[in-house]
Image (cartoon, rainbow, N blue to C red):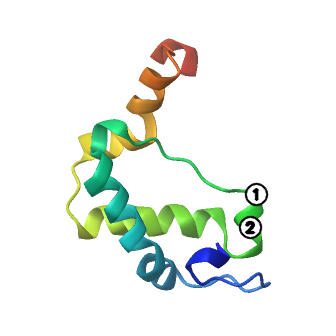
Amino acid sequence: MPVVGFPFSSTNPPVTEIVQLISPIVLYIIQTFGFDRIVFGSNFPVDKASFSYLNLVQALKTIFSENSFSIENQRKIFFSNAIKLYALSPESML
């Protein structure tokens, strides 16, 4: 994530710092494409050089909570839209 200000380092920045830097990007994407056209993805394991996957997920949860995004819309981003995009059946996820 050097693009948004995280250098490659051995430190793991706090969730609050990650939220501050990625929130404008996340909100812009949601505003531009809407909840029905977004699928969660990450740049891991490459981003592991900048921060942990757990802190990334916590940062996204914080952003969604602070902006009162419904559970339904969060489910679209993290699950339902991928099911549609890749033409999967929910049963195949078991």
Contact (Cβ within 8 Å) of mark 2 with mark 1: yes
Amino acid type for the residue under numbered disc 2: Lys
Q: Is residue 16 above or below residue 85?
A: below
The Cα atoms of the two marked residues, 2 and 1, are separated by 5 Å
Residue at label 2?
48
The N terminus lies in which quarter of the figure?
Answer: bottom right
Secondary structure beneath dot 2 equals helix
Within-10-Å neighbours for mark 1: few <14, some 14–19, many 20+: few
Q: Does residue 82 lie above or below 17 as drawn?
A: above
Q: Whole-percent x and y of residue 88?
A: 51, 16
Residue displayed at 50% across by 13% down: 91
Q: What residue is at 67 percent from the left and 69 percent from the top?
A: 52
Of the residues shown, which amino acid type is indicated by label 1?
Pro
Looking at the rendered structure, the secondary structure element under dot 1 is loop
Measuring from the top left, give residue 72's x and y in whole percent. 25, 40
Query: Residue 16 appears in which quarter of the rendering?
Result: bottom left
Give the residue number, with chain letter if any, for mark 1: 45
Residue located at (47% from left, 24% from top): 85
Q: Position of residue 86 (x, y in %)?
A: 53, 21
What quarter of the picture does the C terminus occupy? top right
Q: Is residue 94 visible?
A: no
Looking at the image, is 69 positioned above or below residue 81? below
